[in-house]
Amino acid sequence: MRVVSIGDLVTDYYYKNGKLLGINGGMTSHNIIANLAKMGIKTAVFGVCGNDVQGEMAIKSLEKLDVDVSNIKILDDVRTRCFHVSYFDNENKLSFTSKKRCPFCNNKKWYEDSLIDTDNIINKINNDDILVFDNLNNRNQILIDKVANKKIIDLGQYFELENISDKEIIDKIKNKFEIINFNERVSKYLVKRLNLNTDVDLYNILKPNFMTITRGENGATFICKGKEYNFNIKSKGKVVDSTGAGDAFISSIIKDCIKNNFVYDQDMFEKWYENSNKLTAKVVSKMGARGHINTLFKIRKIDNECTCNNFIYNERKKIKRCNININNLETRIINTVNSSASSKIEDIAFDENDNFLFIGTGGSYVGSYFSAKVINLLYGCNTYSMYPRDVLYRNNNNINKIVLFSYSGTTNDIITSVKDLNKKNIYIVTKGELQKIVLKTGILKKNILSYRSSSNKGKEHGFLSFEGAVAPAAIFLKHYLEKTNYSINIENFIKESINYWNEKLENLITKDIIINIKEHGTLNLFRGDYTDTACYDLESKIIESGIFNCIIHEKKNFSHGRFINYENLNNTISIYFKQKSTTKYEQELLKYLGDNNIIIESNYDGILAEFDLLIASQFIIYYIGKVMNIDVSKPKYSENAMKIYFYKGDL
């Protein structure tokens, strides 16, 4: 299912006090799918534009939002339609005018009759496509009359209705639309024109399944099954520019209708209105109909030509969150090992007779796993690394101490998993703020090992954890080195590891390898010895970014039949983590696996290899994303997925 906008493309020019600010794509139907694309809904556009720089920008503005633009027809003999929106400061309030003529040269780039190819569109739309229109011109009307798809119209003007009869108006609209959205100006015109008394009368004549009327600061009206529901505006916010508010309003309604399978339940109308109101509040706080979605394209003149005729532009380089996080990784880890959290580990008072739970989720599970291994090696005590929900389903009577790992310090799953256990025995490793964690969790202040400091305040953003995975492990690595009197400077070790893997993996992760993984469909990850932490981390990052599927194999357990999957399904691409030493079994296993291995071998053995390979994992996913030209830190999750992500209740 796609939501498809129909119509000629338009490029909007934006000016303030006579100065050109920039340009962006425009037109109601296309603004609607721009909003829906931002919400994660599959969208496409069927339209036309000229073979000029304005058409290029109109297409690019949608393409940047992942709208399918493959069905836009570029015409050589026309110029792309352009609107010129001018804003003027008037006692700290912006007024605006929207015209088809350039305010500088008075040039008009606008053809009157639509040029869309109706036959081509009819042949290419799918049966389950939802079609969005914003006017009733002759070519749109052909599609409206001929296709059986669900159709939605957002009608914000009525000039094309003024020269036709009342019957023709009704015939154009009656029984044609699933949803009709009018602004108040159009609904008033039609009620008066058709000699009706109320908006409900208009609904009963036109017979959509659902009708909405936007009333600006006076809220909105929903009409369904002959009943009227009025809603007052709730969150107005600061109004910078009201253009695009109506487009955003109906976009949100469409999203909620799709989500509810176009079942119009009056008990949900208030929630639908609230959702629309929130989105329109965002829209009006920015300049331009799509200012809340993407910024204006900055353009400049070519010689003395007016920008309405031609221009050049430099597209702003998109900064990937993954790049920022990986570039700051060294500084953040070194700041962490020099923070007070490192010295506070001694306060936990590990003892060989103790039983410890190390609890983490997502990227923080990696820190918990590494730390549990370190403490077991140092003290011989029982350590169990677990996910939060697993803690609730075991007998914890003999657990002496619990160490939680949470980047924010307030992760609901982590806190909920230990809510019935003794707070005196619970510690948390975090980058969160002490006071906030104490207030929200009830954990004792002295038990909070925060590596946040004046020199280490900045937090990484994105769904994949880099600092959040490595920094807690670094704290426990430092503890390990101190307790074993290792003659290794931890800062130098971290720097050397980062520099080594950065250089090595840049050359190792190539386009051919990515193509090979994609062709095979599944990536195998091999863990064991001192490679487990890296393997769990990489699997988590690959799965969370949605780029491949992968299977984790313990190296020896693989020999107990798991090779049948490897052979029968041709899942023969592997990343094999290993420490410097190679066991006899590994030699046989690597011989069996053959040439399709990407071997990630540390220069160290033991716990140093475990940490070193964890650093390698960060650069593996970084260079995978770089080769694929995607930001792996910022995957596009669906709205339903985010509901379980943000779940705050009992586990």
Image (cartoon, rainbow, N blue to C red):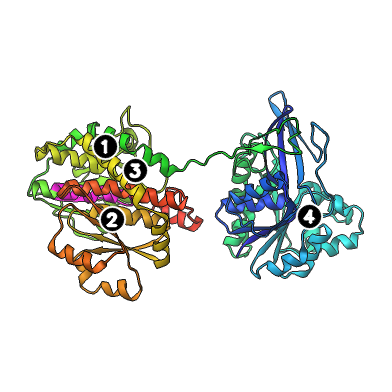
Q: How far apart are marks 4 and 2 (CA)?
A: 54 Å
Q: Nearest the camera: 144 or 324?
A: 324
Q: Nearer the viewer, mark 1 or mark 3?
A: 1
Q: Which of marks 4 and 2 is nearer the N terminus?
A: 4
Secondary structure beneath label 4: loop
Please name which of the two marks, 1 or 2, marks the residue nearer to the observer: 1
Q: Is residue 128 above or below residue 384?
A: below
Q: Give the range drawn in magenta.
A: 355-375
Which labelled disc corresponds to residue 536?
2
What secondary structure is marked by label 1? helix
In which quadrant will I find the C terminus? bottom left
Compare residues 95 and 537 and report the one nearer the observer.
Answer: 537
The answer to whether the residue labelled 2 contacts the one labelled 3, judged by CB atoms less than 8 Å apart, is: no
Is residue 357 located in the magenta-colored stretch of the structure? yes
Badge 3, how many Cα within 10 Å: few under 14, some, many 20+? Answer: many
The label nearer to you, 4 versus 1, is: 1
Inspect the image, locate mark 3, and give the three-letter code of the amino acid beneath it. Answer: Thr
Of label 1 and label 2, which has the lower sequence position? 1
Inter-mark Cα distance, 3 to 4: 50 Å
Q: In this view, does 560 lie above or below 400?
A: below
First in sequence: mark 1 vs mark 3: 3
Q: In which quarter of the image is residue 329?
A: top left
Viewer can see residue 180:
no
In the drawing, what numbered circle is on residue 410?
3
Whether label 1 touches label 2, CB < 8 Å: no
